[in-house]
Amino acid sequence: MALSTQSTTGHGQAAAPRRTDRGVIGAAAIVVFGTAGYFVFPDNLALLTHIISTMLLVLAIDLVTGYCGVATLGHAALFGAGAYGAGIAAAHFGITEPLTMTLVGVICGSIAGLISGIVVLRAHGLAQLVLSIAVIHLFQEAANKASAWTGGSDGLSGIMPDAVFGRFEFDLFGQTAYVYGVALLLVTFVLLRILVRSPFGMLARGVKEDPVRLAAMGASVQSVMIRMYIISGAVAGLGGALSAISTQVVGLDSLSFTLSAETLVMLVLGGTGSLYGAMVGTVVFMFFEDTVSAANPFHWLTIVGALLIAVVLFAPKGLYGTAAAFFERRSRAGKGRDGA
Amino acid sequence: MQTVLSIAVDALAYGMVLFIISIGLSVTMGLMRVINLAHGAFAMIGGYFASYAARDLGLGYGVGVLAAIVGTVIIAIPVERFLYRRIYGQPELTQVLMTIGITFCVIGIANFAFGPTLKTIPLPQMLQGSVDLGFRTIATHRLFSIVCGLVVAGALWFLIERTAFGTRLRATVDNAAMAASLGVRTQVVYAVSFAVAIGLAALGGVLGAELLPVEPYYALRYMVTFLVVVSVGGAGSIPGALIACLLLGAIDTTGRYFAPEYGEFFFYLAVIVIVTLFPRGLAGRFR
Amino acid sequence: MNTLFEVSNLKKNFGALAVTNNVSIGMAAGDRLALIGPNGAGKTTFVNLVTGHIKPDSGRVTLSGEDVTGMRPAARVQRGLIRSFQVTRLFPDMTPEEHVALAILQRDGKAGRMSGHYSAKPAVMKEVRETLSILGLIELSHLKVREIAYGQQRLLEIALAMALKPKVLLLDEPAAGVPQLETTRIERALDQLPKDLAILMIDHDMDLVFRFATRVVVLAAGTVIFDGSPQAVTKDQRVREAYLGSYANAGSAA
C-alpha cells in the first residue's frame, strides 16, 4: 500500500492562497501549450490529440496510484470501456453527437472503474497487483469475444461523429479533434485540481499515508477508495471517448496490459501524486516514443527499460517531482518558513 | 473419459513447465518479499542460450540445457547485486517499475542480438517422437517435462526440508532479522536462492520451449502467468506452487479444449475468484 | 450515575493464551480512569478489542446503550469512541494543520466534499488554530509531520483525538517517549476537555496516573484484579503481587 517514497512534495500545502495561483498557472499552461502545439505542429495534430487522450488515462491512474497508493497494472480497462462505450454508441446506436458520445464514454468508464475497484480493492500487495492484471485481461478477452459489438480483433470502425455544436466538423487534419481534446483536458484539469485540494482529496492522501489512522478518524477507507476509482474511471473514460472520437476506430489495444503498464510508466516518469507530474510524464514519454520507435521499436523498449531503472534509482519522485522538490528547497532556503 | 484423460495429460505437462519456471519466483518472492516481474525474462534468456548452443553451435541438447542454466545465472548475479538489492524492502510500485524496466531492457537486447524470430531448440533423438499411453499418444518431450517437474519438486523439497541450507532458508523466510542474529548470513542465503531460482527459470525456459516458444516478447507475454501462479499458490510455498500450477494448467487447457474462442477468459476469471477467496494464496505466507 | 460505556465479559485468546479473560469495565460520563498493569497484561489488546481493531472471541461492548461489538472501527469512531495510538500513527506528508482540519471535517461529516479548501472555512480554521494552540503546535502548523519531533507528534495525536470530540476517549500511553515539557502540555490539554467526557488512559508513569485518575483498574494476565480508587490501589495485596511477583510475598512475610 505505502508508496510514500514515490510521492512528490508538490502537494505539501505550505500556503493555501499561493496554491490557487499555481492552479491558475497550470490551466494557463495548458492553454499556452495547447495553442502552441496547434501552430508549431500543424501536421502532427493527430499525435497531439493521441497524447491528450493518453494523458487523461495517466491522470486517472494518478488518482488511484499517486493519491490513494494503489499499485495497478490494469487501468486501461477504464480507458477502453470509455472508448468502446463511445464507439459502440456511435456505430450501433447512431449516437453521433460528440458531446453525448463523450458523456457515454465517461459513464462507461465510471462503471468500469466501479467494477475494477470492487475487484482490485479486495486484496493488498501482490494479490492486488495480480487482480488488476486479471481484470484487464478479462476485459480484453470479453471485448474480443463480443466481436459482434466490438469488431473483435479487427477493431470497431464506422464511428462517424457529427460536428461539434453542429458547426465544427471533424476534419482530415484533426484540427477540430485537437481543439476539442485541449478543451476537455482543460476542464478536467480544473475539476481535478479542485478535487485533489478538497477535503475528499485529503482523505485520499490519508488512505495512502496511513489507512489505520484514517479509520481511527472515523473515515471509511474502502468507501474513499471506491469513490476515487469511480472518479478515476470517469477521467479514463473521457480519455477513451476522446480517442474513439478523434481516431474514429477502437482497437483491442485500448484494453491491453501493455497500455496499462506503459501509462503507469509515464506517470512514474513524471512523478506520482501530482497532476503536473502525470501530464509532464505523458508528454515526455510519448514524444520520445514517437521519435525513437519510428526508427526501431525494440530500441525504444530498451530505452524505456533503462529510463525506468534510472528513475527508480536516481529520481524516485519523477521529473516533475524532482524539479518541484528542488525549487521548494531553494525557495525555503531563500525565504525561511513563510507560515502564511 | 478419454477426453478427460487426454486433457489431464496436457494439463499436467503444461502445469509442470509452469512449475519449473515459477517455483524459483515463488521462493524468492516469499524470501525477499520482492515483486519480481522480470523472472520470465530470465527464463527467456535461458531459452536463447540453449538455442544458440544446441542449434547454432550444434553442441547437443544436454550442453544446451547446461549452457542455459550457467549462462543465465552468470548474467543474473550482477543484476541481483546492483539492481535487485536496491529494491528489497521498497514499496511495491518501486519494485514493479524496476523489474518491468529490467524486462523491457532484456526484450530490447534479445531482439537486437537474436532478431525477432522464434528460436527453436532441436530435441535429441531420444526426446523426439511419441509414447503410447494406451488411451492416447503423448510427445516424448512432454513426458520428459513432466518427469523433470516431478524431479525438481522432489529435489527442492529435499533441499529445503532436509539440508542445512534449507534450515537457514526457512529461518530467513520466517524472520530474517532473527535468523541473522542467530548467525545465518542472510545475504548469502538471498544470493544463493536467487541463483537457484534463476537457474530453474532457465531450465524451465528450455524444457518448456515447445509450449512457450522463445521469442523476444516471451518475457512480457508470460510475465503475468508466472506472477499469477505465485499469487494463487502463495509466495514461498512449494506445495502451493505445485497445486497452483496444476490447477491453472487444468483450467487453461480445459478452456482451450472446449471454448478456444474465449481465449484466456476463464483462466483470468478463475484467477480473480481464487485470489479474492484466498488473498494470501492457497498456501501463502506473503503478507 | 448512568453508564456511558460498558465492556462486559470480553474474551480474546491468541492460540492457547488468554490475553483478555472475561474483562468487564463500565464507565460513566466524566470518569477519569487509568488502566494499568505490568507489561504483557493485555492493556493494548484491550483497547484494540474495544475499538474494533481486533475481533473479540466473546463479550460485548456498548456505547450509550448501543451494542457496537460487531462494528467496524470507523463506525465506532463516528459514535464517539476515539482512541490514540501507543506508537504514533500520523500522515507523514501532511501538516499538523491539515491533520486537525481533516479530523474536524470528518467529525462534521464534511470530509467527503469534493470541492473547496478547508482554509476557506473560517469556522474550521478557528477551531484548528485553537486546538493546535492548546497543544503548543501552532508554530509548526505548516511543517510536514515527518519534519517535527516525536514528542510533538505525540501532542498531535492528542490534538486529533480532541478535534474528533469524543464521548469516550481511550489514550494508549499518551506520554510514552514524550519529554517533560510536552507531558505537562498533554496534561493541560486533558484538563481542558469537556468534563462530561469519559477518558480511559493507559500509562506507566504513576505520577501522571495519580494526578489524572479518579479511578484505577489493574489488569494482570488478561484479568481485572483491581478496580477502585487511586488511594486504595497501592495498598492492594494482589496488585503488589502482580507487579512485584513473589518478591512481594517474600517481603511481606519477612
Image (cartoon, rainbow, N blue to C red):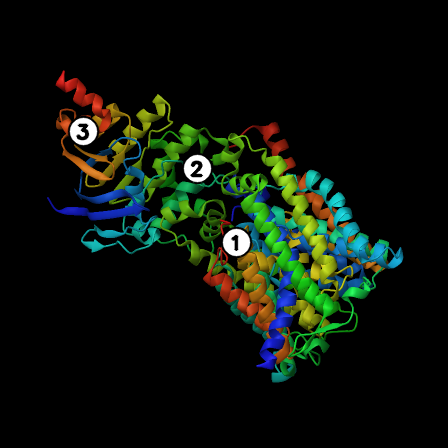
The relative height of residue C207 versus residue A155 in the rendered view (above or below) is above
- Percent across and percent down for residue C47 are 29, 42
**Residue A81 shows up from this direction:** no
Quadrant of residue B233 within the rendered picture: bottom right
Crowding around mark 2 (Cα neighbors within 10 Å: few <14, some 14 to 19, many 20+) is many
Residue C23: assigned label: none
Real-space Cα separation, disc 3 to disc 2, in angstroms: 40 Å
Chain letter of the residue beneath label 3 in the structure image: C
Real-space Cα separation, disc 1 to disc 3, in angstroms: 57 Å
Residue identified by numbered label 1: A194
Chain letter of the residue beneath label 1 in the structure image: A
Residue C96: assigned label: 2
Chain letter of the residue beneath label 2 in the structure image: C
Q: Residue at x 48, y 62 (%)?
A: B276
- Percent across and percent down for residue B156 are 60, 50
Indicate the amino acid at tag 3.
Answer: Val
Q: Nearer the viewer, mark 1 or mark 3?
A: 3
Crowding around mark 1 (Cα neighbors within 10 Å: few <14, some 14 to 19, many 20+) is some
Q: Residue at x 15, y 46 (%)?
A: C3
Q: Marks 3 and 1: in contact by CB < 8 Å?
A: no
Front residue (pair B286, A100): B286
Q: Nearer the viewer, mark 2 or mark 1?
A: 2
The relative height of residue B125 versus residue B164 in the rendered view (above or below) is below
Q: Secondary structure at mark 3?
A: helix
Crowding around mark 3 (Cα neighbors within 10 Å: few <14, some 14 to 19, many 20+) is many
A86 vs B118, left or right, is: left
